[in-house]
Image (cartoon, rainbow, N blue to C red):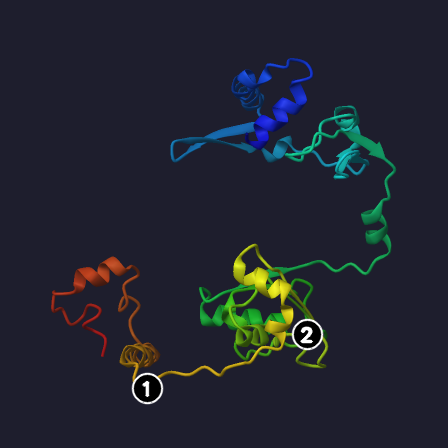
Amino acid sequence: MTWYESWANKSLSPIFPLVNKLIRPIYEQTLKILTTSGILQEKRQNNERIWAIFPESLKISKNVLQFKCRLCGQDMSVAYDERPDWEQAPCLRFNCNGVYEEVSTIDYYGKLYASGDIERIFAEEHTGLLDRDTRQELEKRFKSPDSERRPWYPNLLSCTPTLEMGIDIGDLSSMILCSVPPAQTNYFQRIGRAGRRDGNALNLTVANARPHDLFFFAEPESMIEGEIEPPGVFLNASDVLERQFTAYCMDGWVESGIVDNALPLQLRYVLGNIGSDDSNKFPYNFR
């Protein structure tokens, strides 16, 4: 049973116990009405129907009530105008048969915004897909001192491992890893980006539901106190050395200055050039 079938069954079975056979027609009719009324937009993707909500259909209210499921305790923040629809409504959780009831509310966010030290977040992405000038300008703005910062400069970076190795990111104070790194060396390299100025930093690691992450979640000392092995390469590994040398030559070739079309944008063009013996086409122009 899907969540949608479960929800329809919980909502309508008290009225009609044999509702299971009518669930699909009910949803078909509901989506049709929502689409014709201009709330939803129907599209097709890979021969499947999908629906999206028009932004104009959404309403924001500052008058909020709090409802809680009396069985599982799930909290829901509800607009005051929708109060009758949520009173005694079935819980949204899949396996819960409880109902919602109104509880007293505390305007937590209202108090926070009125009295807290709030700073707007300007997030940017830092990946290897960025060209060098864009990446360097992003790093410069992110770690600029307070006297030189502009209000719109980024104060949060979402990064791939591009920032793992030895980059000074200024007075970075906090870091969140979205998964447990593959090895102790990677872990220390990544958390070492924070606290480089005064040695103080907050580092958080999210353990995903996979064996590697769950092992270190249960045994965090194995990651924190593990042995760090320096990177190395076996001189007898000719394939590895060949790739390293090729990469070095490619970097030198590009650094020397090449025309924009010297490197094809897609691999199929490279494969198509093989056998042509045209010295102006890659890989034959690679010298």
At horizontal 56% and vertical 61% (from top left) the residue drawn is 213
Left or right of 257: which side holds 194? right
At horizontal 72% and vertical 77% (from top left) the residue drawn is 200
Can you give x and y, in whole percent of width and height, for residue 239 in the image? 28, 77
Q: Earlier in the sequence, mark 2 or mark 1?
A: 2
The N terminus lies in quadrant: top right
Q: Is residue 43 above or below residue 27?
A: below
Residue 235, numbered label? 1
Whether residue 164 is visible: no
Q: Quadrant of residue 225?
A: bottom right
At horizontal 62% and vertical 70% (from top left) the residue drawn is 142
The C terminus lies in quadrant: bottom left
For the residues carrying marks 2 and 1, which lies nearer the camera in this image?
A: 1
- The secondary element bearing badge 2 is classed as loop
Left or right of 277: which side holds 201? right
Instruction: Give the residue at mark 2.
Output: 148
Can you give x and y, in whole percent of width and height, for residue 67 in the image? 79, 34
The amino acid at mark 2 is Glu
The amino acid at mark 1 is Leu
Can you give x and y, in whole percent of width and height, for residue 193 in the image? 61, 75
Whether residue 21 is visible: yes
Q: Quadrant of residue 152?
A: bottom right
Left or right of 101: which side holds 8? left
Give how far apart the Cα atoms at labels 2 and 1 are: 48 Å
Residue 19, numbered label? none
Q: Is residue 81 above or below residue 245?
A: above
Mark 1 surroundings within 10 Å by alpha-carbon count, few (fewer than 14), some (14 through 19), many (20 or more): few
| Observer-nearest of 35 and 21 | 21
- The secondary element bearing badge 1 is classed as loop
Q: Quadrant of residue 256?
A: bottom left
